[in-house]
Amino acid sequence: MISRIAIVNRGEAAMRLIHAVRDLNAAAGPDGHRIETIALHTEGERRAMFVRESDHAYDLGPASARPYLDHAVLERALRETGADAAWVGWGFVAEDPSFAELCERIGVTFIGPSPEAMRKLGDKIGSKLIAEEVGVPVAPWSRGGVDTLEDAKAAAARIGYPLMLKATAGGGGRGIRRVDSDADLTDAYERTRDEAERAFGSGIVFLEKLVTGARHIEVQVIADGQGSAWAVGVRDCSVQRRNQKVIEESASPVLGPEQEQEVRTSAERLAIAVGYAGAGTVEFLYHPGERFFAFLEVNTRLQVEHPITEVVTDTDLVKLQIHVANGGRLDDLPDGRPTERGHAVEARLNAEDPDRDFAPSPGRIELLNFPSGPGIRVDTGVGEGDSIPADFDSMIAKIIAHGRDRDEALARLRRALSETTVVINGGATNKSFILDLLDQPEIIDGSADTGWIDRVRGEGRLVSHRHSGVALVAAGIEAYEDAEAIERARLFESARGGRPQVQHAVGRAIDLKLRGTAYKVMVLRTASDRYRVSIQNGGEAHVVDASIDRIDDYAGRITVEGRAHRLITATHGPVHLVEVDGITHRVSRDEGGVVRSPAPALVVATPVEVGAEVAAGAPVLVLESMKMETVLPAPFAARVRELLVAVGSQVETGAPLVRLEPTGDGDEVAEAAATESVDLDLPDSTGHTATARERADRRIGDLSASVLGFDADPAGDRRQLSSYLAARDELAAEGHVPLAEEISVLELVADFAELSRNRPVEQERHTELLVHSPKEHFHTYLQSLDADRAALPDEFRDKLARVLRHYGVEDFERTPQLEEAVFRIFLAQQRSAPEINLATSILQRWLGEPAPAEQEAAAARDALDRLVVATQLRFPVVGDLARSVRFRWFDQPLVDQERASVLDGVGDRLAALAAEPDAPDHAARVDELASIPEQIVRFLADRLHSAPGGGLPEHEPMLEVLIRRHYREHELHGLHTFAAGGRPFAVADYTLDDRPTHLTSTIGSVAELEPGSALDTAVSADVWARVEGHQSVVDLYLSWPDEPESPDEASARLAELLEALPFTQDVRRVAVATSPGHGRPISYFTFRPTAGALVEDRLVRGVHPMVGRRLNLWRLTAFDVTRLEAPEDVLLYECVARDNKDDRRLVALAQVRQVVVVRDDEGHVTGLPHVERAIANCLEAIRRVRSSRGARASKLDMNHVWVQIWPTIEADLGQLTALQTRIAPLTAGAGIEEVLVQANVTTDPGEAPLPIAGRFFYQPGSGVVGTVGAPPTERLKPLDDYASKVVRARRRGLVYPYELQSMIAGDGGTVVEHDLDDSGALVPVDRPLGLNKAGIIVAVVSSPTVRHPEGVTRVVLSGDPLRSLGSVAEAECARVIAAIDLAEQMQVPLEWYSLSAGARISMDSGTENMDWVARALKRIIEFTQAGGEINIVVAGINVGAQPYWNAEATMLMHTKGILVMTPDSAMVLTGKQSLDFSGGVSAEDNFGIGGYDRVMGPNGQAQYWAKDLAGAHAILMAHYEHAYIAPGESGPRRVSTSDPVDRDVTLSPHSAPGSDFTTVGEIFSSATNPDRKKPFDIRTVMRAVSDADHEPLERWAGMADAETAVVQDAHVGGIPVCMIGIESKTVARRGFPPTDGPDTYTAGTLFPRSSKKVARAINAASGNRPLVVLANLSGFDGSPESMRALQLEYGAEIGRAIVNFDGPIVFTVISRYHGGAFVVFSKTLNPRMTVLAVEGSFASVLGGAPAAAVVFARDVDARTTADPRVAELESQLASASGVERARLATELAEVRSAVRSEKLGQVAAEFDSVHSIQRAVTVGSVDAVIAPQEIRPRIIAALEEGLQG
């Protein structure tokens, strides 16, 4: 019995044997006979599936040696493995009788026929001769081998063409070629012989007549060599390509029962005739038309396609082979001769590329999914991760489908193949070809013959173009994603280095080729999973929208214009394999003439040389793969530019082989590349057929995606926007505005605007947020994509989370989705146009639409409010529009509603008054109407047009009402009414500007303005009846139905009519209110007699002259005024200065007739809502005009709002500035110069009202400030030269330095400008502001303070941005040097507001400017080294020389001055533009190069940050409170304090995250902190020690990696001190710490940066103020990272600073005091140092724990060994053995470790007890040990003593 079978085969064949053996073993049961399998494999197949699955394996050596054909190698393998049988399968030596003899010779059973039978039948020549002997028909043939070409030609002439040239040992489609002529025969003869020799070891060939149109029929035979032979089944293998079987089936669809029986009988006769034993196949050609058979050959082996016979007969042919080889008889089988059931079809799935003429396409299998289900069998020899080697055949699997009939079997095979997924790295499969094949009618009806495939492919069929367009779309998307992945990686890599950058093109153009045709593909990513793809092949582009849903790295679904497809993709180099619904397409990126290898192959020939020219289609390379040659043609006429390989080279898939250079012109090359176009099978875009709603949804999605950073159409967002707005307009016309969607879009814009702000806003009160902008936080986040590691504040996390949700990312876990979202956010931040255009377009539409319904109103209001705040800094135009919409939708209705409620019933009340003119309460009712806080003149107009019969009423109460409204505050008296000339009159007297005046008021019509009319007569009579000495004014209220539309025309006509009336020349003015009726508004015109003519006072056109006076219109007399359209209740004028046409402003005026004062619980004024609403109305009017002017609006940036309040206000004058905080956000972005609010105010009900004016204006450097004073008495002045400079600077975003004077000097301060005299010395100058002669302005400034009432004096320098952007040359440097000289002479600090473009660059000066810069630099160094102090506020962009000056003045170890930065400042050595131009590394702007957030704050060169210049000045003054030394004094002045000297600091509260201490005292308690190792907050302790009534000033608060040291200027007992605290809690590190440094900054440790901070602080205080150190200091960090970062140098600087310190030092140990820190702070370094230690503190060279572990390690080990627990176990271990010894050894190790830890603690405690703080006192290291309650008084006492000493 066979027990060990050597498998002389590989792959799927080997697995077939292994499966059969496993079945036999399983059937034998656990105690039955078992067979082992031995896999013989090549060197490269050690991990192949058949090797893994076999019982044993044997390495035959390299495949290149062809070991499967080498008998010597195989014999050695059989002997060494102990095999007792050999199974050969098919191929290799399966039909080699010599191998069968070899087996017989060495005693190995050959599972197959005898050598004799193989020789007789296996030889194609011999088998034909035998067939002829036994009567089997044979086609005409050469009746033997043709050994020479001449013999072959002779035989061909005898038989006749066409012929088949065959190798006698050939098989599997190899060694066989069709020849149709002598020329073909000549070409094929040697190639066929060589191929057969290589593949089968025999080059003998013969000729056979080609039977065209024939079917390939084969009979499966199994014989036992003992007289029995069964024809088990008949197969039809007619579907062949180039004689290689593709699809096989059983039974044949063309054979009837008689034909089938005939071939079965013939096959059995042949087998019996030669004594055949084993499996074999007899092959026939059958011509259905002629119904005859022709014997082909006998394959003396098992066929590849044998499974279809097995499934229809339920037989295992391999098991039958083993049965026969074991000597078994067929007749002994219990089931007898098998019978057929149903139908089976098999397809061979190969690694070959149909698009490359079925070239072998091997490679590693990256994905493999086989089908399953009813009727499906898969035979394979590979699994996922295996490789299809280039050395052997390309079989992946055989897929067999079995059904009840042929149709079911074919259907199942189609289904199975479509469910099969194979991805080969660098390879391809014939899957789509087979699927296409199975759908052909010739396959379905069974009519395909052996030449059918070759014929129809020659006709262009069986080349599937189905889904070609989808494949191109998918390949384009993959190419886009590949490029984007590189961009993302680049972004995160550069971000980690602190400079995030990416080169991203919107859209990506990709040149692709599919089946030789070139396509230009443009891909836009319009959303995370959506793309817009354009495909062009010479003609018009086809554009589609596509989305991809990825399932894994390969599988997914693609939807193109709503049509979904299954998708498998794999990219290998420039090749994309794309399978769409089972159809595979090989899409390659066009590389311009590079020819690549289609598969792993051997280069066998290079028919052309470098430089040679080749025609399109000519061969340029010949490759061999799987023993088959592949000729690579030139894709176009070209010259061989470069051969990249040599003959004999082994190349991989996709390897570049040759580079071609086109020789034809562009059109020819294009024609060659763009072969005949195919139907891309793409759906048309649905955009043009979609409904308005669908178009709106689609476009708003595209626009939103653009805001999200996705790609916009290269044609521009505007086209998309226009398309959306058009669709929206259609919807709006139907009453369906997509408001909810637009609200979502605006929320999206707001979210992005908040995240992208590069400046903090006032609403973000948190200190961290006021320093760092959201954009800076985002850059920090980019470094790690870890919100915790980046230490991002919660407010920013909320902003980021909101934005991430728009991408479908719900948390901060790092995923590919998060990375993609962050990448897109970064791209979105680089461009702002999409969001501005989208938001402004939507808001402009909203402005013209009614307010939303209630269900959407709240969401709209919230979105608008957020948009206003989010965009006010970055996109003010959006914020302005949002304010306008909010006003129009939500504020204006409230105003209208309130107005309507106030005016309700006025008409009826007037009618009642007119009907009862003598009513007793008439006057009271008139007063009541006069006090209505709305315009009511319209009621008079209504009454004029509604009088019965068109006449005039006898009584008109409105005349009285209007007189009282307009004149009552001007000593109004004598008001009475009468009738004259058929009309009512109301007359009165009043006094204006000390001029008694008589007022005549009446009604009528313009038609009555004629001399002698009743109106003229009556008015003249009253005017001329005035009291002697009184002037007259006339108010006429006239109807004018024909009033011209043009106000100018109306004014001219009125002037003409009035001039004819004599009384008009005898009055001060005539005010005419005209009413045209028909809903048109009332117009006011005021005329004054001038030189005999009436001239209109245009300033008050549109208002009553008394209202104009009240609104201060007289102040505009220096301007030409044009009234503009504005909201109701607002007068808006465009004012152009008469003497300066560039001085153009908007002035908005409003009246407030009703006031409500809102107060808080303490009675303080918090708001004046009616006043605020009036201001908002005015600002809205200004914004509308600015918005409508577009770019020209930038000139309208000096606008005014004037508001007049009618009612008297009861309030504290100072409280009215509460409006400042409410007005400031309203005015943002409106270009407001001032808001002026005038009112009469009384602080006591019994006092007379006081006219006051609240003025709110922008103060440079301070923002909006408010003052309260007297009303203005001067006209508004046009811009003069100085004011023009102020405006020019403002328009550049800068501050003109003279504007800072009041802020710098403060209340009561003085500023004396200085300039150089002839001698070069600075002297005071008395000249108008702005006439400085150089770009540096010098002044001596003195600011009185409580401590220095005489003033804190300093020399101040300011850069002038209007003089060459503050660039410096000799004039400026000379003033810098002189200013330093003056400061030194006056013994005061130098204060510098620096703004400079660096050394001046011009045609007439160069290096001499640099020399002058150096002279100034030298003077700065000399001054600061001598102890001089220079304090710098960086007031803008500082370039080149200025940053060096700043550094020399404030950044070195010896300097004492401070440097303050604001969000508008940066220091750069080279500006961004210069860096970019020169190829240097820059950032997105100058702030990224040298701003505070990213550079100057973290590196400690900027010591303070302020939100604006006013904040910077406040920091300077706070600094002077601690450090200013008045001339002639020895140090800073002490300050009185109410904080007791003996205050107990232990009672101070302590609250810090991660700490359990609730009071400072618990830090020092032996109960709560016995070892002084628990963390606490050092700032809390410092604050507890310093004076409670003086706020400390922390220096270097933003310095990165220096957090373990805290530096504050503080007062202790009223004494100004520099206080240093060592942080006593762990500080997290940002970003990724280096591997050689600590993960966190540990408590009580100084690191390089914190050491540097401490040294600089000590030096800065030296000679100025005392030093107080609160130390919990274990030492310096000694990690490699710290040593690399100059830890030694900066630690040594501390020691030097202590030695050189001039002044008292109080060093207080509050916890621990060890190591190197002990050295640099030792009291021996400075005799003026006092060292105090709080009880319970520790002081030693080393802490107890490290001392025990390192210094006393031997003592610890000795104590451990002597411990009884260890000694006892060691004793037991010595006498134990075996398992017990092992157990005891383990126990001893555990006990020893525990005991050693215990002994370490003991030694550490002993060390600490010896080296106690008391010992330090004894040896003189510490002066005193103090109780915690004494910390503050003892420090103060030590300071007092030190100062006195």
Image (cartoon, rainbow, N blue to C red):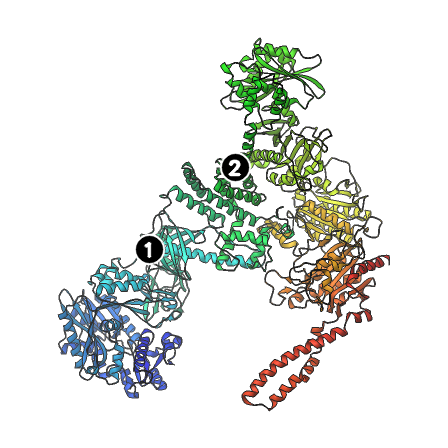
**Amino acid marked by disc 1:** His
Which amino acid does the dot numbered 2 rest on? Trp
Residue 1625 or 1375: which is nearer the viewer? 1625
Q: Which quadrant of the figure has residue 883?
A: top right
- Which quadrant of the figure has residue 696? top left
- Residue 1662 is tagged as none
* Label at residue 467: 1
How far apart marks 2 and 1 lie (CA) works out to 52 Å
Q: Residue at x 26, y 57 (%)?
A: 460
Quadrant in which residue 1274 is drawn: top right
- Residue 136 vertical position relative to residue 1384 in the rendered view, above or below: below
With respect to residue 1430, does 175 lie above or below?
below
* Image mark count: 2
Q: Position of residue 807 (x, y in %)?
A: 48, 53
Give the crowd class for mark 1: few <14, some 14-19, many >=20 residues within 10 Å: many
Q: Work out whether residue 605 or residue 1216 is closer to the camera in this orientation and state it.
A: 1216
Mark 2 highlights which residue?
889
Quarter of the figure that contains the N terminus = bottom left
Please indicate whether residue 703 sits to the left or right of residue 1425 in the image.
Answer: left
What residue is shown at x 72% (from left), y 67% (from top)? 1567
Q: Secondary structure at mark 1?
A: loop
Place of residue 1022 in the rendered image (x, y in percent of width and height, measured from the top left)? 64, 12
